[in-house]
Image (cartoon, helix red, strand yellow):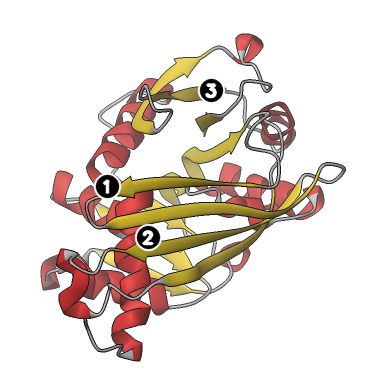
Amino acid sequence: MCTPIKGRIIGAKYVWYQMVTHNGLNTVQFLDAAHRMVVGGSGGRVLREDFCGTGLVSLHWLLLFRKAKVVMVNDTAEPITFGAVLNGWSKGELCRATVFVDDVLNVREPADITCALNCSWCAFLDDETLLKYFRQKRETSSVFVLNLYGGSQACVVNEWSQHGNTGTYVWEHKEWDPATREVKAAMHFYPTYDSELCSDGSNEALHEAFTFHWRLRTAEHTVDLLKQAGFSSVLLWEEASTAEGHGTGTFHPHPIARFSEQSPRWSIMITAA
């Protein structure tokens, strides 16, 4: 059994976070394809990650496009710092990255593409503040990409688990208010003790490794707010799923008029330009 070391345990939650929330290469390929489809041309070369986590998406963007630059914004430096070490950023890659440790509303750095992934933008609980954020994206980005999940089985108090060779990941809705659509959620990680992650202390159980207080708006309401903010082209992209119901990370365009909010569980990307 590994000896718990505080710094290693803090870093461990970011190891797990990346494993269950990101496929960096798939994400940047989607972002580039979406930019080409929505705007045309050769694709954007400055990517901005709002509410940036470990920066894995930004890193893959720099690896895919050798002359590209990235802007990473988070109100705390911890996840970006751990991510740079965890993912082995080179000096050259670091030179092409600009980091802002600040509220996203305070940073008006422009970009070809801005993304707010892992539903991080849902932390804006009131429409007035969210609309302000969307308007800022309209003014500073050619294409804005965000994601959202929902469905009749998702918008309840419940938990969902995913098992793998290194352990079990649990996503829990601890509280759900159907009137406001506010949710209090948590991510739990329960590694197996023979996991390869054991060497850095990551085999410690991480109950409530991350907690969230979000408002899960409907897709229809989100699209409406984006249009109020001035975006003229808003598209939905629905994630394909496995037979077990897990997302594949592959998204396909889905007509807004035929999108069903009441599907048991759904995960979408939204592009706005």
Residue positioned most to the top: 258
Identify which residue, 247 or 30, lies in the foreground: 247
Question: Residue 251 appears at what percent x and percent y?
Answer: 39, 25
Question: Residue beneath label 3, please?
Answer: 235
Q: Quadrant of residue 272?
A: top right
Question: Residue beneath label 2, please?
Answer: 17
Question: Residue beneath label 1, please?
Answer: 24
Earlier in the chain: of badge 3 and badge 1, it is 1
Give, as a three-letter code, the residue at label 3.
Leu
Name the side, left or right, on which 141 lies relative to 95.
right
Q: Mark 2, mark 3: which one is toward the viewer?
A: 2
Q: Is residue 78 above or below residue 32?
A: below
Name the side, left or right, on which 99 lies relative to 58.
right
Q: Are marks 1 and 2 in contact (CB under 8 Å)?
A: no
Q: Is residue 46 above or below residue 81?
A: above
Q: Quadrant of residue 155?
A: top right
Identify which residue, 215 or 80, lies in the foreground: 215
Badge 2 crowding class, 10 Å Cα cut-off, few under 14, some 14 to 19, many 20 or more, is some
Q: What SS does tag 1 mark?
A: helix
Q: How many marks?
A: 3
Earlier in the chain: of badge 1 and badge 2, it is 2
Give, as a three-letter code, the residue at label 2.
Tyr
Residue sitting at x 25%, y 71%: 84
Question: Residue 238 appears at what percent x and percent y?
Answer: 48, 23
Q: Mark 3, mark 1: which one is toward the viewer?
A: 1
Question: Residue 16 appears at what percent x and percent y?
Answer: 33, 62
Residue sitting at x 64%, y 32%: 153
Residue sitting at x 20%, y 53%: 62
Question: Residue 104 appears at what percent x and percent y?
Answer: 57, 63
